[in-house]
Image (cartoon, grey):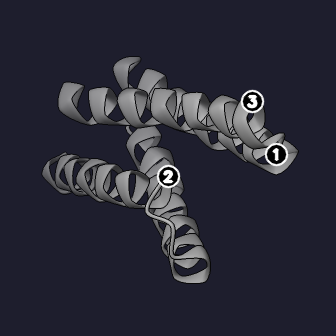
Amino acid sequence: MIVGSIAALVYGALALAGGVMGYKQAGSKASLISGIISGALLVLGGVLTLLGQAWGLLLAAIVAGLLIVVFVARLAKTRKLMPAAPMIVLGAVSLAVLVNQISNS
């Protein structure tokens, strides 16, 4: 479960940082709010897993999956690789790790 927790915590930290960067660079309140909410939920999932709550992995996996969908739609709409492409790749890696951990527990 530690690997899944680490994946959730890292992806959550990146989502938080991305939301703050989106706000600073473009003044996007939507980026800030969605980055804070999704990042906090991912971090919460990672922490819950570390505390022995197996449903933390499920929470993190659902949020990671939703973020992948959001960033794929954003990439399709804007055709801009940043920040969509890295978040899709990192989300897919995190989701794969989380699903693997869920299936092994």
Question: Which amino acid type corresponds to the residue marked 2 in the rendered image?
Answer: Pro
Say which residue appears at 66% left-offset and 40% top-offset: 35
Say which residue appears at 58% left-offset and 68% top-offset: 70
Q: Nearer the viewer, residue 84 or 39?
A: 84
Question: Which amino acid type corresponds to the residue marked 3 in the rendered image?
Answer: Lys
Q: Residue 28 shows which numbered tag?
A: 1
Image position, residue 78 (x, y; %): 60, 75
Image position, residue 8 (x, y; %): 39, 35
Image position, residue 80 (x, y; %): 51, 67
Location of residue 77 (image quadrant): bottom right
Location of residue 73 (image quadrant): bottom right
Circle 2: element type: loop
Say which residue appears at 30% left-offset and 57% top-offset: 89
Q: Which residue is mark 2?
A: 83
Q: Residue 24 shows which numbered tag?
A: 3
How crowded is the residue under tag 1: few (<14 C-alpha within 10 Å), some, or many (20+)? Answer: some
Residue 62 against residue 98 in the figure, above or below: below
Circle 1: element type: loop
Tell me, yes or no, if residue 26 can be seen here: yes
Residue 74 against residue 40 in the figure, above or below: below
